[in-house]
């Protein structure tokens, strides 16, 4: 989409937002009084919203009954969420950019959960070339509800809806002015959190709008204030282990002895002694965050206007500015040679400085700043009494900058070492890296710089949809929805120039830039088959098919079938089966390709004397000479993105029941079985693994033997190309059961509402590539993917009267084994963990109300897990902060 068309789209969006008109369509508000609505999981208008699949609805009231001030924490607490996701209470997450926040349904990956805003896609967040929506961009104060569809929905919504869909519905029917202020603080007196939400809405005879401004600020929490040091098991006891990158400098002498230099401020600069991990290792925790600093402001406007009696103009506008920051341990220098004649070398011998932490300038300070814009404009209306249509344009753009202070320029570091050797003629200052406190301000100014990276994401789409009834069947009308989509998605990232050159003491990065274009068409049907029969009060068949044509991958067809069977009043059975897919992200496709040396052994080196018949035959078939011997211990390896990647494919099966007995009014019980299979999963397989697997397969039959993975010289037999780029190689299987209970009842003159949701994860198995042994994650925590306990549950009980309500909620996280621990190790298995939260809300007047609450009432500590070396626990799964109190005041004008 060119700049002119983008400008027209934004202009039309802003124009429509300023108009005053009638109530918004029900699919946008979730609260308008209409007979039929469009619900998450279907594009067909229907009066019954319970038959489209297993879903959890988080209402505005449920959000208000928590102390949570951000969307991601609400979603990640759901039992259906698991694994790693980004949030502000975890300062380590970098998979989608520092400071971002995501949701990870089923724990299958943040890029396999589709996030929608009012039923439409949202541009990816982060600071460039990202692969998931940053939930920081969506203000909590404007949310009417969140629909969480726990089923694949690619046939309905397109790519990425593999694990499920989160559809965030904003408030668009509000009238008046409402101001809400929130404040929270931990029991330790830190982690202050502030939020102010202002909502303003006007409605007229022909239209209206709702506008909101949201401000949130979170103060950081230092890791050492929760965990004084990273722990490890030594001799059956937990001790502080620290990092071997010491502040004095750890070096190795020609005889192999490791020594460490002075670590006492103002101490003897020539002092050194044998290295001792217990004595010299660096405690990182005082230089880390347990919670990141966050400040953000969001502005949203949602409006509609009746152009005629049956044509409505609508628009949405959202802008979010986010600033986040983290501290990190001082950077370190590695593998620097200090010659014997260097004036700073007190040993009189040439030494290799293995690691030296640059502690003099203090911690590195990471920072991120992003701007996200999103505009939607469209028309919708009715065609007679049975049909409605909608045409809309959706454009979003995120731009950002991120970086860090106190990054070392390695070329200048080497200059400062050379400056200490007799005969140096350059201008660099001499630097003494052998001992803490010996680096002068002049040296630090010379070698350190502030790294700055820039990037962004862009998404533009045009959609046209129609829904209605084709004709009446004996059991009811045949519902249909159809539509077409055109979508462009772009991502780019431009790292700091010194990072690109590889001269900074951080990971080398290459620029990333790429785009994907999609054309799609879909049809959805809802056919009532039987009605008003014994044991078949209603049976309805639902189906959808979607055709997608990608400029990079060709075409793809996904489909979904569903059966909804109302056996009798109060008993309903449902089943769905569908296929899905996820397209590779921009970094996976277009990440900068670079070459490096991988330390590995070529399986064909000296193969003729190995005695392995399969290996001998395979090496001979590859044209490797009989006397071939690998030169050295490294192989030139290619890393980065892979433009040959194809979409992942998935199959989803759900079987469920809904029980609402007439003899217990207000009770609803749901049970849903889920089975998710993912094939061609995108994984990074080391080049060394590809070589080993290929040459162990009969007749070079494994897919890793293909030329896209490695090639050999036809003259020497050496490996001259070896790919460690991502590839479609994996298979994943997940099975489990969701349970839900809702019960509303009266106790004397009081109203009581019980809500209980539980997920049992029966199986999560990953086969990283063909022929590999399966990796079992269910019942484990760690292993690089996060936590997957078998059981997770949330329950809440709210008791209310006319002017007050009180809520007690419990979150249960079942026990799990540490993926990386051995039986008998300390912390090899986490216990069952329960978090209790309480809130009391009181209506002061018709216009004012107040709520006070405490999260983690009993100050439950997070369990110790050896796989996490700084926080000593999984901060994605457990609460590291401890007890926290909050107050909320709200006034409506």
Image (cartoon, grey):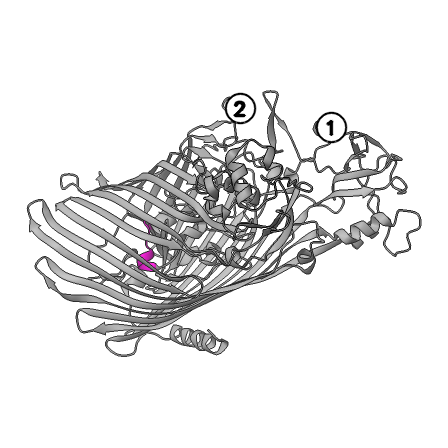
Q: Nearer the viewer, residue 107 or 288?
A: 107
| 694 with respect to 344 (left or right) | left
Badge 2 marks a residue whose secondary structure is: loop
Residue 130: x and y in percent read: 51, 57
Mark 1 and mark 2 residues within 8 Å of each other at the beta carbon: no
Badge 1 marks a residue whose secondary structure is: loop
Residue 557: x and y in percent read: 32, 59
* Location of residue 311 by image quarter: bottom left
Specify the farthest residue to the right: 423
| 653 with respect to 680 (left or right) | left
Q: Nearer the viewer, residue 423 or 855?
A: 423
Mark 2 sits on what residue?
A: 825
Q: Give yes or no for residue 713 being in the magenta stretch.
A: no
Q: Nearer the viewer, residue 61 or 125?
A: 125
Range of residues picked out in magenta: 149-157
Q: Earlier in the sequence, mark 1 or mark 2?
A: 1
Does residue 837 lie above or below 418 as drawn? above
Q: Is residue 267 visible?
A: yes
Badge 1: few (under 14), some or many (20 or more) residues near its Cα, within 10 Å? few
Q: Is residue 444 visible?
A: no
Q: Nearer the viewer, residue 421 or 798?
A: 421
Residue 76: x and y in percent read: 42, 45
Mark 1 sits on what residue?
A: 276
Name the residue: 45% across, 74% down. 10
Residue 288: x and y in percent read: 62, 42
Does residue 388 lie above or below 761 as drawn? below
Q: Quadrant of the C terminus?
A: bottom left
* Location of residue 630 by image quarter: top right
The CA distance from mark 1 to mark 2 is 24 Å
Does residue 547 lie above or below 263 as drawn? below
């Amino acid at each position: 989409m060119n700049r002119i068309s983008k400008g027209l789209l934004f202009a039309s969006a802003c124009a429509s937002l300023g108009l005053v008109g009638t109530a918004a369509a029900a699919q946008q508000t979730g609260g308008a009084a209409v007979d039929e609505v469009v619900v998450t999981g279907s594009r067909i208008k229907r009066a019954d919203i319970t038959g489209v699949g297993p879903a959890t609805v988080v209402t505005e009231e449920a959000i208000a009954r928590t102390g949570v001030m951000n969307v991601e924490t609400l979603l990640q607490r759901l039992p259906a969420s698991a694994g790693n996701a980004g949030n502000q209470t975890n300062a380590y997450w970098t998979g989608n950019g520092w400071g971002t926040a995501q949701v990870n349904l089923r724990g299958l990956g943040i890029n396999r959960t589709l996030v929608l805003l009012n039923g439409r896609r949202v541009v990816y967040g982060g600071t460039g070339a990202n692969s998931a929506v940053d939930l920081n961009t969506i203000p909590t104060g404007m949310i009417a509800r969140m629909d969480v569809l726990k089923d694949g929905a690619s046939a309905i919504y397109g790519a990425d809806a593999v694990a499920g869909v989160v559809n965030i519905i904003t408030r668009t029917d509000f009238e008046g002015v409402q101001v809400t202020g929130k404040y929270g603080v931990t029991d330790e007196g830190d982690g202050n959190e502030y939020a102010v939400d202002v909502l303003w809405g006007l409605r007229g005879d022909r239209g209206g709008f709702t506008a909101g401004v949201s401000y949130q600020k979170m103060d950081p929490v230092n890791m050492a204030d929760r965990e004084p040091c990273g722990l490890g098991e030594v001799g059956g006891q937990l001790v502080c282990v620290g990092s071997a990158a010491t502040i004095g400098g750890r070096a190795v002498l020609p005889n192999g002895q490791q020594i460490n230099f002075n670590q006492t401020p103002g101490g003897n600069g020539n002092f050194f002694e044998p290295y001792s991990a217990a004595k010299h290792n660096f405690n990182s925790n005082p230089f880390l965050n347990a919670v990141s600093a966050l400040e953000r402001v969001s502005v949203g406007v949602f409006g509609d206007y009746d152009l005629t009696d049956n044509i409505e103009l609508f628009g949405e506008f959202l802008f979010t500015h986010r600033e986040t920051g983290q501290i990190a341990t001082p950077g370190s220098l590695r593998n620097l040679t200090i010659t014997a004649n260097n004036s700073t070398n007190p040993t009189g011998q040439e030494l290799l400085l293995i690691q030296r932490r640059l502690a003099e300038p203090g911690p590195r300070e990471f920072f991120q700043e992003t701007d996200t814009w999103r505009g939607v404009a469209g028309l919708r209306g009715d065609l007679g009494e049975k049909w409605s249509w909608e045409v809309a344009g959706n454009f979003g753009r995120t731009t950002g900058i991120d970086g860090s202070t106190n990054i070392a320029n390695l070329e200048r570091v080497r200059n400062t070492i050379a400056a200490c050797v007799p005969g140096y003629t350059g201008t660099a200052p001499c630097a003494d890296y052998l001992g803490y406190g010996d680096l002068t301000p002049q040296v630090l100014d010379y070698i350190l710089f502030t790294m700055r990276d820039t990037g962004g994401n862009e998404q533009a789409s045009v959609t046209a949809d129609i829904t209605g009834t084709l004709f009446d069947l004996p059991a009811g009308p045949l519902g249909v929805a159809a539509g077409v989509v055109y979508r462009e998605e772009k991502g780019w990232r431009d790292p700091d120039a010194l990072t690109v050159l590889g001269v900074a003491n951080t990971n080398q990065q290459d620029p990333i830039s790429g785009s994907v274009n999609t054309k799609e068409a879909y049809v959805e049907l809802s056919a009532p088959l039987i009605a008003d029969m014994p044991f078949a009060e209603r049976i309805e068949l639902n189906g959808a098919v979607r055709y997608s044509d990608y400029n990079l991958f060709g075409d793809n067809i996904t489909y979904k079938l569903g059966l909804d069977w109302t056996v009798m009043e109060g008993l309903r059975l449902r089943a769905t089966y569908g296929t899905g897919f996820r397209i590779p992200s921009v970094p996976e496709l277009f990440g900068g390709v670079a070459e490096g040396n991988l330390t590995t052994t070529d399986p064909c080196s000296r193969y003729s004397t190995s005695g392995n018949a399969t290996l001998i035959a395979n090496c001979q078939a590859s044209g490797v000479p009989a006397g071939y011997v690998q030169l050295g211990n490294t192989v030139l390896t290619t890393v980065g993105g892979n433009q040959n990647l194809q979409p992942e494919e998935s199959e989803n099966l759900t079987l469920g029941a809904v029980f609402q007995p007439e003899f217990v009014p207000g009770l609803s019980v749901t049970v849903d079985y889920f089975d998710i299979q993912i094939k061609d999963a995108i994984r990074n397989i080391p080049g060394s693994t590809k070589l080993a697997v290929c040459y162990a397969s009969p007749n070079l039959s494994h897919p890793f033997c293909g030329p896209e993975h490695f090639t050999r010289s036809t003259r020497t037999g050496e490996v001259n190309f070896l790919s460690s780029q991502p590839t479609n190689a994996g298979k994943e299987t997940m099975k489990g059961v969701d349970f839900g209970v809702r019960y509303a009842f009266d106790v004397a003159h009081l109203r009581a509402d019980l809500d209980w949701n539980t997920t049992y994860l029966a199986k999560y198995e990953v086969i990283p590539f063909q022929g590999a042994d399966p990796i079992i994650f269910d019942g484990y925590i760690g292993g690089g993917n996060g936590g997957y306990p078998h059981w997770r549950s949330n329950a809440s009980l709210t008791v209310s009267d006319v002017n007050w309500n009180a809520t007690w909620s419990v979150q249960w996280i079942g026990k799990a084994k540490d993926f990386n621990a051995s039986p008998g190790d300390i912390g090899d298995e986490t216990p069952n963990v329960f978090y209790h939260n309480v809130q009391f809300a009181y209506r002061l007047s018709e216009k004012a109300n107040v709520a006070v609450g405490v999260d983690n009432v009993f100050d439950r500590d997070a369990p110790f897990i050896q796989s996490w070396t700084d926080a000593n626990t999984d901060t994605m799964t457990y609460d590291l902060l401890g007890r926290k109190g909050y107050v909320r005041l709200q006034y409506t004008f």
